[in-house]
Image (cartoon, rainbow, N blue to C red):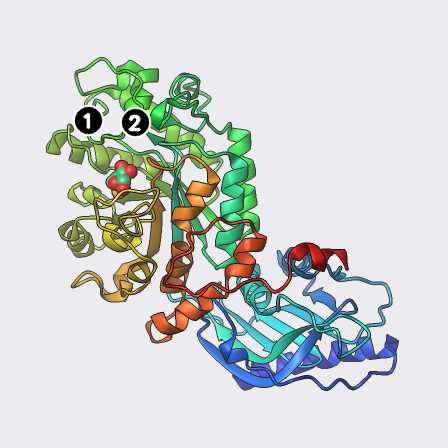
Amino acid sequence: MKKSILIKSLVVLIVFTAFVACQQEKKKVINFPMTDLSTENLIPRPLKITPTNSAFGLDKNTIIYTSQNAAGFPEVGKFLSEKIKWQTDLDLAVNSTTKATTQRIIFINQSDSTEFSSKEGYDLYISQDSIILNAKTAEGAFRGIQTLRQIIPEVSNDTLSENKMWLIPTGKIIDYPNFEYRGSMLDVARHFFSIDDVKKYIDVLAYYKINTLHLHLADDQGWRIEIKSWPKLTEIGGSSEVGGGPGGFYTQEEYKDLVAYAAKHFITIVPEIDMPGHTNAASVAYPILNGNGKTPKIYTGTEVGFSTFDTRKDTVYSFIDDVVREISAITPGPYFHAGGDESHVTKKKDFIYFVSKVDKIVKKYGKRMIGWDEIVHADIDTTAIAQFWANEDNAKLAVEKGLKIILSPGKKAYLDMQYDTLSKYGLHWAGYISVDTGYVWTPERYVQGINKENILGVEAPLWSETISNMDELEYLAFPRMIGYSELSWSIEENRNWDDYKVRLGNQAPYLDKMNVKYYPSKLIDWKKSKYTYKTINKD
Ligand code: TNX
């Protein structure tokens, strides 16, 4: 820690301790047991942990303070209070002005220190009397409180004082992410998932510091987002899904609500409209868009590569202009994903022409285009991003052209791949991905010639041909998604399967309490919850 931060933190500590001391009863000396912050079950593993082997007793007298004039900080404090309530049933006041008889504080402090090179970085100082979280931005503070949530024990200690106390190990943590883009993708097109389902997914992603959720909003089997200027997209295109189920779609109001929910969790939504292939549902609604020479009919199967837009028709580009404009207007994040994969019935020259035109439309509405790795063949701006999923040559070409890469290699990061031959759901065209296979690889060196500076981050896609409800979604996504959080946040030296698998096993109480139906891989020794949560809540 630099001296300047130390002094700043000390000043903060002194001011607050003084403030609290004026009102508190005489402090009782508590003999805290030995702890070790470095062996806590943190995922993703923080950059640096220095244990000091005592404890902070979180109890009903703890109060939360935040910097009050720093944008977003009071909200982060409230979020922490709500989650502590959920975990422990304690009701902690946030920035309360009433006189408190308290002994310990959690202070979430906005710091302008130049130490914070990443906007998501944070430092956490835990002592017996206080927890101080320093961050430059509310986003950094938000990542930091996930760390704090993860070290609050499941069970309280009832013997140290009159109050139940949750003993948080003392020490300091210095942390920031290895990659700036840490994502998951959800295919809501093959099977539709409701806003509430997606919100539940966001809750868990945020706990593991994921910062991006890519929504695959249109494919051959369904169109899932209201476009006001082309209403049949959802009226007709939204009414189908794989297997013949009812489908569904998000109104723009619902999508906005989802985007706001994600933003509250510092998660950016990346909307994807996959084109020129994967567009059967759009062409069923508006046959004028179709370019494959066949009369489009509703499709509920799982084949790919048979549909295309007509890449030489002006109407198609006015359509795309409307779609990109309407979606961009309700998407605050910087990206628009334009798909581009498996356009097997689009001629190569038409594909190149199409992608270059779409790139310009996306830019016109102030967004950076992301596309599946095939887009690198087009003449596109270097601000575009290639999402590598299958073809290493495409990924290398992207780097030669100066594009950044998102790594989603099918063999390692596809959440829809089966764990093994016994898996109930999923596919296996890219192989089987057991929990260790999904974790044991090095994004920084996965494709020869593609180095850390070329990589924006890692994203794990969950395609939904074989899953149609939350239980099935969670079976495929968890626990593997938790591993991708560590692969994208933690530096290589801090990633180790033997160490990770123990920390993963200890996530079970959280996942159980969240009612996440994860796949209970036999490779992991899953921790049993010591208490049922009903008991905790009753006390
Ligand atoms: C390939 S990955 C696809 C998707 C399928 C997925 C199934 C990619 C860009 N395209 O259309 O859903 O495989 O694993």
58 to the left or right of 253:
right
User: In the rendering, at what x and y percent does residue 165 appear?
Assistant: 72, 72
Q: Residue at x 36, y 73 (%)?
A: 498
Position of residue 292 relative to residue 423, above or below, is above
Foreground of the two, 350 or 491: 491
Position of residue 20 relative to residue 362, above or below, is below
Disc 1 + disc 2, Cβ < 8 Å:
yes
Instruction: Classify mark 2: helix, strand or loop.
Output: loop
Q: CB at mark 1 closer than 8 A to ligand 1?
A: no
Q: Residue at x 24, y 19 (%)?
A: 290
What amino acid type is highlighted by mark number 2? Answer: Asp
Pick whichever of labels 1 and 2 is earlier in the sequence.
Answer: 2
| Occupied quadrant, residue 480 | bottom left
| Occupied quadrant, residue 8 | bottom right
Could you tell me how far apart the alpha carbons at marks 1 and 2 are, in whole angstroms?
9 Å
Residue position for label 2: 220
User: In the rendering, at what x and y percent does residue 381 appear?
Assistant: 25, 46
Instruction: Classify mark 1: helix, strand or loop.
Output: loop
Position of residue 406 relative to residue 186, above or below, is below
Disc number at residue 527?
Answer: none
Instruction: Assign ligand 1 to one image quadrant.
Output: top left
Residue 179 in view in this figure: no
Residue 108 in view in this figure: yes
Residue position for label 1: 306
User: In the rendering, at what x and y percent does residue 512 appear?
Assistant: 55, 54
Q: Residue at x 48, y 59 (%)?
A: 208
What amino acid type is highlighted by mark number 1? Answer: Phe
